Amino acid sequence: MLTVNRSVERVTISVPHELASEADNYSAELKVSRSELYKLALERFLAEQRRERLKLIVAEMAEEYRADKELTALTVLDDEEFV
């Protein structure tokens, strides 16, 4: 009986030969499988995308804060500036 790991999904991708070759060199150097290398790269990419999305949200919130006189009215009392 074949056991299937439900927490892992098999994905097939196509990459240019040069990129695959360079990835293979790094996987050998790092002593990880090609699959592990691609998984790590995808995790880093997704983490970076989440960080960039949060930066945009924070910038929007900061701008809304600066534009809202009710929110900024008391900051002069604190002698603090919202950055």
Image: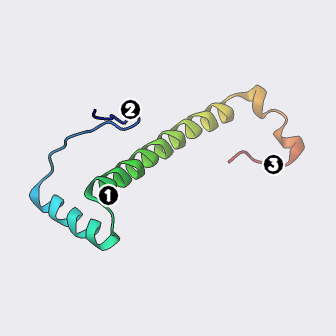
Q: Is residue 25 above or below residue 13?
A: below
Q: CA distance from mark 3 to mark 1?
A: 46 Å
Query: Which of marks 2 and 3 precedes in the sequence?
Result: 2
Give percent across and percent down for residue 83: 67, 48
Q: Quadrant of the N terminus?
A: top left
Q: Which one is nearer the viewer's eye here, 53 or 82?
A: 53
| Left or right: 76, with 7 as reference point | right
Q: Farthest residue toward the front?
A: 1
Q: Residue at x 33, y 55 (%)?
A: 36
Q: Is residue 67 above or below residue 83?
A: above
Q: Amino acid at mark 3?
A: Glu
Label 1 element class = helix
Q: Which residue is mark 3?
A: 80
| Left or right: 7, with 58 as reference point | left
Q: Residue at x 70, y 28 (%)?
A: 68
- Which is more foreground, mark 3 or mark 2? 2
| Disc 3 and disc 1 in contact, CB within 8 angstroms | no
Give percent across and percent down for residue 4: 33, 34
Q: Amino acid at mark 2?
A: Arg
Q: Residue at x 87, y 45 (%)?
A: 78
Q: Farthest residue toward the right?
A: 77
- Which is more foreground, mark 3 or mark 1? 1
Tag on residue 6? 2
- Which is more foreground, mark 2 or mark 1? 2
Tag on residue 37? 1
Mark 3 surroundings within 10 Å by alpha-carbon count, few (fewer than 14), some (14 through 19), many (20 or more)? few
Q: Quadrant of residue 33?
A: bottom left
Structure colour scheme: rainbow
Q: Amino acid at mark 1?
A: Leu
Mark 1 surroundings within 10 Å by alpha-carbon count, few (fewer than 14), some (14 through 19), many (20 or more)? some
Q: Is residue 60 above or below residue 82?
A: above
Give percent across and percent down for residue 57: 55, 36
